[in-house]
C-alpha cells in the first residue's frame, strides 16, 4: 500500500537524506547490470528451492557479495512505498578440466573441436526475500563475455529493483545460483521503524503508543476497512502527542485500521492496519460472525470484516458430530451452514432454529426433482439417504409409510425449496411413543430377570461372606486332647469358616442328647454345602475299629467316648453308601497318630496330618468351586502359630507325661 509522505517523514526523520532517496516510478520490477554484462529478469516469481550443492563442471559465475539500498517506489508524487534495491556482485570460480588425451600425449586431442575456454559464461542467479508475512524468489539471468572471464576475478554486478517491505520490518535476503555450486549468501536488512506508533500487549489489553512531539497536533481514527463499500468508523479524536490509547483484545479484528493525519489544511491521511496477521484478531472475527436466514433460498453471513470462506449444506442428528453432507446435494446454501476458511471449520450454525425450536429427533426428507415433474424422496440417515418407501432395516425405512403420509397431509415443515429440490423436517415423536411402550415392557422383563439373578448372587455372596460351615468330630481321649481340639477350632474360626464343635455346645448336647445333636448338626452342615471334619486320635481309631467289627457299641464303652460313639451312627452310613467324598475330610496330629492307622473305610476321603499338611487341609475346607487363594499359605502359618502353644503343652507338659498318650493302635512313643 503506498505510504504518504507524512508517514515517511515521521519514520525517516526530517532530513536531507529523505529527499536524496532515489525514486522509482511504476509498479514493475526491473534489473540492470555492470557494463559489459547482459542480464534479464524473469517475468514471474519462482519457487524458493535452493537444492543441493553440485560439483562445478568448470568455471562458473558465483555470488560473492550482497549490497542493499533503500529506494522509493512512487505511484504519485507524495505516495511512495519503501523498496529495497539489491546488488549481487559476481566472480568467476573454478577451473577448466584438462582433457585426458591432452594430459596423456601432451597435446591437443582434436584441434577441430572449439576451445570451451574461449566461450562466454552464463548463470541463473536467484534472489530470495523473506519479510514476515511475505516471501518471494526472483530469477536473474546473467551472461559474461569470454573477454571478461578471469579465474577468481570479479566480473561486475547485477542489480534488482526492487523488493517492497513495510516500515519497521526485517528483510532477510539469500542469493545462490541454479544449479547451486556454492553455499548461498545471506544478508539481513532492518527497515526504519515508526517511532510515533508502537503496538504493545499488556495482559488482555493492547496499547497504541503514539510517540509524537508535544507541538504536533494530529487526528486519529479507528475504523473497519471494508472490501466493498465505505469504511465503518469505530472511534475518532483530535489529539496532541504523545498519547497512549488502550484497546481491549476482544476489539481486535483483522480489518481494524488506524488513520492518522496532521491537523493542517489539505493534509494527506495515512492508513495502517497492524492486526491483519494477528491470531487473536482472526479468532475474534469468527466469534463475532453470525449467519442469518433471509428466505427459503438465501442466507447472510454477518462479520466485521470480509471473510474468504466456503459454505456447505449439511445435516446433523441430535448428539451427532460432525455435520454430514446432503446426498444427493441441493444448491450450496444450507440448512446447518458449515463455513470453512483455510480448510478449517470455523462456524457451524442451524439457520432454522427459530422455526424448528430445540434440536429434536426429526427426520429430514430430501426431495429431488427431475425432468417432466419426476420427483423422488429419501430420508437422511448416518448411513446415507434411504429411498422411501424402502424395505431396508433402518429407522427411516421402518417409519417410511408414516413419513410419506405426514408429508402429504402437510405435517412436515419445509426448510428449503429451489429448482433442484426441497428439504422437509418431519416429526417422529408420536411414532416413538408407540415404540416406547414395547421398550418399557421389555425393560421391565429384563429388570425382573436381573433382580432374580442378583438375588441368587446375593444369597451366594452372603454364604461366601459368612464362610463355609465345618462340623468338628473328635474322641475326647483326655482333657489335654480336648484343649488341643479347642485350640484348633478357635484357630479355624479366624478364617472364613463357621466351626461347630461339641465343646462349645455342652448345654444343647445335654438337652438334646448326643445322637440328636450330632444328627441335627450334620444335616445342617451338609445342606449348607459344608464339610464334616473327623479328627482321629488313638481313642477314635479304637472306637471306629470296634464299631466296624461288632456294628454296636461295646459293653465298656462309656464316659468321654460316648459322644463320639453317638456321632458314628450318623457318619458311618455316609461312608458305607459312598456319599462321604466331597463332604468329609479326616485329620490327625503328626506325633500322635500315623494316617495309615486310620481304618481303610475312612481313608476313602483325604486324611491330613497337622500341622505339617495345614495348607492342603485348609484348601480342602474351602468351597468346592472356590479358587485357590494366594493367601492360603499365609492362613496356614496363622493357624499353625495359634495351634503351636497347645501342641507344645500337649506333647511337652511340665512334670510327668500326660495320661492317655500312646493308647491305641498306631500311637507314637510320646517323644
Image (spheres, helix red, strand yellow):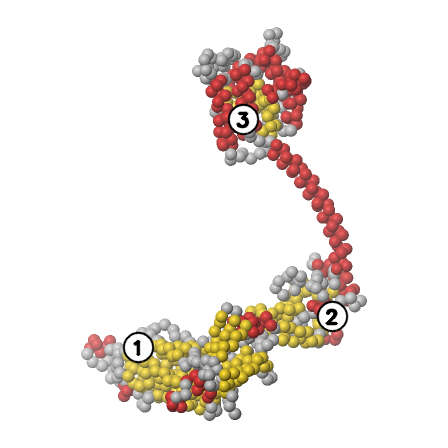
Q: Report if the CB atoms under discs 2 and 3 are less than 8 Å apart.
A: no
Q: Determine whether the residue tagged by mark 1 lies in a helix, strand or loop.
A: loop
Q: Earlier in the sequence, mark 1 or mark 3?
A: 1
Measuring 34% from the left and 81% from the top, which residue is drawn there?
Answer: 66
Q: Nearer the viewer, residue 286 or 108?
A: 286
Q: How dense is the environment of label 3, judged by Cα within 10 Å: few (below 14), some, or many (20 and up)?
A: many
Q: Which mark is residue 491?
A: 3
Q: Determine whether the residue tagged by mark 3 lies in a helix, strand or loop.
A: helix
Furthest residue in direction right, as rendered: 409
- Horizontal placement of 511 versus 495: left or right? right
Q: Say which residue label 2 marks.
A: 414
Q: Which percent across, then down, holds residue 32? A: 37, 88
Above or below residue 361? Residue 271 is below
Question: Does residue 571 appear in this view?
Answer: no
Measuring 58% from the left and 77% from the top, which residue is drawn there?
Answer: 305
Q: Earlier in the sequence, mark 2 or mark 3?
A: 2
Measuring 49% from the left and 31% from the top, which residue is drawn there?
Answer: 633
Furthest residue in direction left, as rendered: 106
**How far apart are the alpha carbons under marks 2 and 1?**
75 Å
Image quadrant where residue 430 sits: bottom right
Q: Which mark is residue 31?
A: none
Measuring 43% from the left and 83% from the top, which residue is drawn there?
Answer: 11
Q: Say which residue label 1 marks.
A: 57
Q: Which percent across, then down, holds residue 111? A: 24, 84
Q: Nearer the viewer, residue 336 or 115?
A: 336
Amino acid at each position: 500500500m503506498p505510504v504518504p509522505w507524512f508517514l515517511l517523514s515521521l519514520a525517516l526523520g526530517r532530513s536531507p537524506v529523505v529527499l536524496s532517496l532515489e525514486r522509482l516510478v511504476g509498479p514493475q520490477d526491473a534489473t540492470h547490470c555492470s557494463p559489459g554484462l547482459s542480464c534479464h529478469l524473469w517475468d514471474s516469481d519462482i519457487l524458493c528451492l535452493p537444492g543441493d550443492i553440485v560439483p562445478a563442471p568448470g568455471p562458473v559465475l558465483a555470488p560473492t557479495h550482497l549490497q542493499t539500498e533503500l529506494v522509493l517506489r512512487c505511484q504519485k508524487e507524495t505516495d511512495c512505498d519503501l523498496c529495497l534495491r539489491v546488488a549481487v556482485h559476481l566472480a568467476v570460480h573454478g577451473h577448466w578440466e584438462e582433457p585426458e588425451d591432452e594430459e596423456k600425449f601432451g597435446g591437443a586431442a582434436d584441434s577441430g573441436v572449439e576451445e570451451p575456454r574461449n566461450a562466454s559464461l552464463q548463470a541463473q542467479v536467484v534472489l530470495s526475500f523473506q519479510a514476515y508475512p511475505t516471501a518471494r524468489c526472483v530469477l536473474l539471468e546473467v551472461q559474461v563475455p569470454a573477454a571478461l572471464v578471469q579465474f577468481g576475478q570479479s566480473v561486475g554486478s547485477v542489480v534488482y529493483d526492487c523488493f517492497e517491505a513495510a516500515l519497521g520490518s526485517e528483510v532477510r535476503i539469500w542469493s545462490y545460483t541454479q544449479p547451486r555450486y556454492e553455499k548461498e549468501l545471506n544478508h539481513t536488512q532492518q527497515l526504519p521503524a515508526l517511532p510515533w506508533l508502537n503496538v504493545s500487549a499488556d495482559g488482555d489489553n493492547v496499547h497504541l503508543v503514539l510517540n509524537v512531539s508535544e507541538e504536533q497536533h494530529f487526528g486519529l481514527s479507528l475504523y473497519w476497512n471494508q472490501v466493498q463499500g465505505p469504511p465503518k468508523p469505530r472511534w475518532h479524536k483530535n489529539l496532541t502527542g504523545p498519547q497512549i490509547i488502550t484497546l481491549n483484545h476482544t476489539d481486535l479484528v483483522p480489518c481494524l485500521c488506524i488513520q492518522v493525519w496532521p491537523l493542517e489544511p489539505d493534509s494527506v491521511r495515512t492508513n495502517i492496519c497492524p492486526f491483519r496477521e494477528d491470531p487473536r484478531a482472526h479468532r475474534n472475527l469468527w466469534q463475532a460472525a453470525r449467519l442469518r436466514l433471509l428466505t427459503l433460498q438465501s442466507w447472510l453471513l454477518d462479520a466485521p470484516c470480509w471473510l474468504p470462506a466456503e459454505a456447505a449444506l449439511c445435516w446433523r442428528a441430535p448428539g451427532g458430530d460432525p455435520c454430514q453432507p446432503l446426498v444427493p446435494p441441493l444448491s450450496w446454501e444450507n440448512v446447518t451452514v458449515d463455513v470453512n476458511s483455510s480448510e478449517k471449520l470455523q462456524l457451524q450454525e442451524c439457520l432454522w432454529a427459530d422455526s424448528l425450536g430445540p434440536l429434536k429427533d426429526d427426520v429430514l426428507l430430501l426431495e429431488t426433482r427431475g425432468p417432466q415433474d419426476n420427483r423422488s424422496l429419501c430420508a437422511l440417515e448416518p448411513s446415507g439417504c434411504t429411498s422411501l418407501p424402502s424395505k431396508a432395516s433402518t429407522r427411516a425405512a421402518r417409519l417410511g409409510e408414516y413419513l410419506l403420509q405426514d408429508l402429504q397431509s402437510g405435517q412436515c415443515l419445509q426448510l428449503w425449496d429451489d429448482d433442484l429440490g426441497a428439504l422437509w423436517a418431519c416429526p417422529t415423536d408420536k411414532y416413538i411413543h408407540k415404540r416406547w411402550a414395547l421398550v418399557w415392557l421389555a425393560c421391565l422383563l429384563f429388570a425382573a430377570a436381573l433382580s432374580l439373578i442378583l438375588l441368587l448372587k446375593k444369597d451366594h455372596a452372603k454364604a461366601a461372606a459368612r464362610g463355609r460351615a465345618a462340623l468338628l468330630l473328635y474322641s475326647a481321649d483326655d482333657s489335654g486332647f480336648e484343649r488341643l481340639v479347642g485350640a484348633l477350632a478357635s484357630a479355624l474360626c479366624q478364617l472364613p469358616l463357621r466351626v461347630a464343635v461339641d465343646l462349645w455346645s455342652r448345654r444343647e448336647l445335654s438337652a438334646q442328647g448326643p445322637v440328636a445333636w450330632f444328627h441335627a448338626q450334620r444335616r445342617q452342615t451338609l445342606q449348607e454345602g459344608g464339610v464334616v471334619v473327623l479328627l482321629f486320635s488313638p481313642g477314635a481309631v479304637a472306637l471306629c475299629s470296634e464299631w466296624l467289627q461288632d456294628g454296636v457299641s461295646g459293653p465298656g464303652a462309656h464316659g468321654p467316648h460316648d459322644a463320639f460313639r453317638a456321632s458314628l451312627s450318623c457318619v458311618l452310613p455316609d461312608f458305607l453308601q459312598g456319599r462321604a467324598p466331597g463332604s468329609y475330610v479326616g485329620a490327625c496330629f503328626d506325633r500322635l497318630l500315623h494316617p495309615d492307622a486310620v481304618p481303610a473305610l475312612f481313608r476313602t476321603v483325604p486324611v491330613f496330618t497337622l500341622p505339617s499338611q495345614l495348607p492342603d487341609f485348609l484348601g480342602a475346607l474351602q468351597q468346592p468351586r472356590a479358587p485357590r487363594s494366594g493367601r492360603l499359605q499365609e492362613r496356614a502359618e496363622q493357624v499353625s502359630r495359634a495351634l503351636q502353644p497347645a501342641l507344645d503343652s500337649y506333647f511337652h507338659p511340665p512334670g510327668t507325661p500326660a495320661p492317655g498318650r500312646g493308647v491305641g493302635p498306631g500311637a507314637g512313643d510320646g517323644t
